[in-house]
Image (cartoon, rainbow, N blue to C red):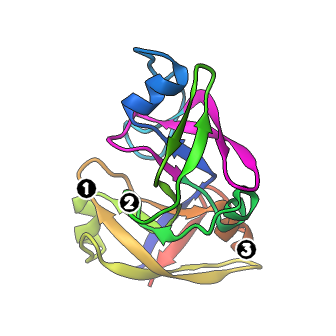
Amino acid sequence: MERKVPIGLSNKHIHLSQTDLEALFGKGYQLTPMKDLSQPGQFACEEKVDVVGPKGKQTMRILGPVRPETQIEVSIGDGFVLGLKVPIRNSGDIDGTPGVKIVGPAGEIEIGKGVLVAGRHIHMSPDEAKTYNLKDKDVVSVKLDGPRGLTFDNVLVRVNPNYLLDMHIDVEEGNAAGAKNGQTATIL
């Protein structure tokens, strides 16, 4: 059985804690959903903020809902623009990552950590994992065919009842392979 997975390209974005959201947008502020994302309950927001590093700044869209801790996901190239050496990490693993200044319409904050390049990963439900003979935290390789096709190694499998099958790579990885959102690849 071929184990197919759709590709989702992830551009630079920020996840905010409620405390940081209110510091940037005002007390009691709530995010404004703009578009649903591939994972249930996740959405791109109307709101954007400026992220300021030692060398430069970038405007980034906020993704919701709010999270327990603020986290900024960038590509390696985005790190160069900001002037940061950004480690590749799994989402949520922010200890030892660089911090930045974040500027919103009602204020600005400095975070001491939280900027990372998100490691490649596949979201899947327990039923999908069972069908594919995989489990949470497995690490797999995924082959993408095409004129610039390649094999992605070190892809973390994340299994949760709230997930739908989708592999997330950043736009730089996707561009290197000529990948498009929704294109399917094969788990090896």
Position of 7 relative to 101 (above/below): below
Could you classify mark 3 by the number of other residues whose Cα lies within 10 Å: few (under 14), some (14-19), or many (20 or more)? few
**Horizontal and vertical percent position of residue 155:** 44, 76
What type is the residue that disc 2 sits on? His
> Where is the N terminus found, in terms of image quarters?
bottom left
Residue depicted at x 38% and y 29%: 18
Q: Secondary structure at mark 3?
A: helix
The answer to the question of whether label 1 and label 2 lie on touching residues, with beta carbons closer than 8 A, is: yes
What type is the residue that disc 1 sits on? Asn
Residue depicted at x 22% and y 69%: 130
Can you identify the residue that label 1 sits on? 160
Q: Secondary structure at mark 2?
A: strand
Q: CA distance from mark 1 to mark 2?
A: 8 Å
> Where is the C terminus found, in terms of image quarters?
bottom left
Position of 130 relative to 65 (above/below): below
**Horizontal and vertical percent position of residue 127:** 23, 61
**Horizontal and vertical percent position of residue 167:** 48, 63
**Horizontal and vertical percent position of residue 99:** 53, 53
Q: Which residues are magenta?
A: 45-72
Q: Secondary structure at mark 1?
A: loop
Position of 25 relative to 79 (above/below): above
Residue sitting nearer the eye, 61 or 8: 61
Can you identify the residue that label 3 sits on? 176
Q: CA distance from mark 3 to mark 2?
A: 22 Å
Mark 3 vs 1, N-terminal side: 1
Residue sitting nearer the eye, 73 or 56: 56
Q: CA distance from mark 3 to mark 1?
A: 29 Å
Can you identify the residue that label 2 sits on? 123
Camera sees residue 120: no
